[in-house]
Amino acid sequence: MHAKTTDGADRARALEIFMAAVDLGSFSAAGRALDLTPSAVSRTIDRIETRLGVRLLLRSTRALTLTAEGRSYLLAARRILTDLNDVEQQIADQGAPRGRLRISAAQSHGRLCVVPLLGEFMRLYPNILVDIALTDTLVDVAGGQADVAIRFGPLADSGLMARKLGETGRVIVASPDYLRRAGTPCVPEDLHDHNCLNFNFRRVEPTWPFRRGGEDFALSVKGTIEANNGETLGELAVQGVGITRVGKFSVAAELESGSLVPLLEEYNPGDVEHIHAVFVGGGNIPARIRVFVDFLVDNLR
């Protein structure tokens, strides 16, 4: 067993020496880079050629030239050493996850729910470099734009792995000051007389869903401001600009403090959005991704 291990290590070292000689253009340069004598580099390549029974390099006083077999061997050597480095990194990561972790999260949910957790995550995993982008634009995880993305609503059939982080309901809210000035809606139809602040995602007439007597229906609403995230709409509602319908997570603190109050709860249809972490799956999920997703599952649910 020991002899096989040594032979494998020697052959990996030989690949490294061969690549250095080709990349640097001479045995002397390769020797300097690897702390070897030029003759040691030459002997290593001679042994490879003897074992294979072909010439890999044509030597001259001015240059080293790859043969056709040498070009094939060089491509294989690069692939083998890259694979070996990747495997060693994955194994090392099992003990101490490390490396850059690129996270994509929606603006409101990221700022209110994910960012507050990052301090604890970094204390647990100090060798991970967190690179987080808060954006309401969907990034291409499969295409390598992020390692982990947090998504709301139904998931597209993308082939990505997904783990559920939780779900959020919707709530209609307004500030006490607004309600004193404009009155409190008692039934959904009263919203026609109010300034309803909405999301700007839709390209059709905005509607809010309701349920009455077991029947679901949608009501058209209008207002003077639209925004692309619930945190902004909630802040506008706190300022007394109007009434809005947003995810509960984005106004949880305001509801608790009383700066916003819930409205028309008896007509709430109970619709929820599921929240998932999505990432590229496969046989070897990097440890930095695995531990982060586990951390989100434990702390967001």
Image (cartoon, rainbow, N blue to C red):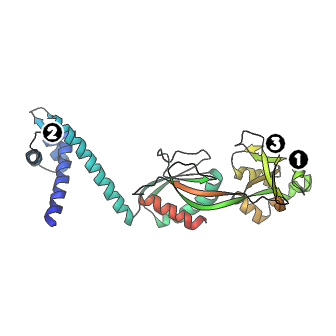
The first of marks 2 and 1 along the sequence is 2
> Quarter-wise, where is residue 205 in the image?
top right
The first of marks 3 and 2 along the sequence is 2
| Front in this rendered view, residue 258 or 289 | 289
Mark 3 packing: few (<14 Cα in 10 Å), some, or many (20+)? Answer: few
- Tell me the distance, in whole angstroms, between the alpha carbons under discs 1 and 3: 13 Å
Q: Position of residue 19 (x, y in %)?
A: 21, 44
- Residue bearing the label numbered 1: 192
| Front in this rendered view, residue 224 or 126 | 224
Q: Is residue 103 visible?
A: yes
- Tell me the distance, in whole angstroms, between the alpha carbons under discs 3 and 2: 72 Å
**Three-letter code for the amino acid on which mark 3 is drawn:** Thr
Q: Residue at x 55, y 63 (%)?
A: 296
Q: Position of residue 291 (x, y in %)?
A: 47, 63
Residue 85 lies left or right of residue 138; in this view the side is: left
Residue 142 lies left or right of residue 66; in this view the side is: right
- Residue bearing the label numbered 3: 224
Residue contact between numbered discs 3 and 2, judged by CB atoms under 8 Å: no
Q: Residue at x 91, y 52 (%)?
A: 182
The tally of labels here is: 3
Q: Position of residue 119 (x, y in %)?
A: 54, 63
Residue 243 lies left or right of residue 251; in this view the side is: right
- Residue bearing the label numbered 2: 26
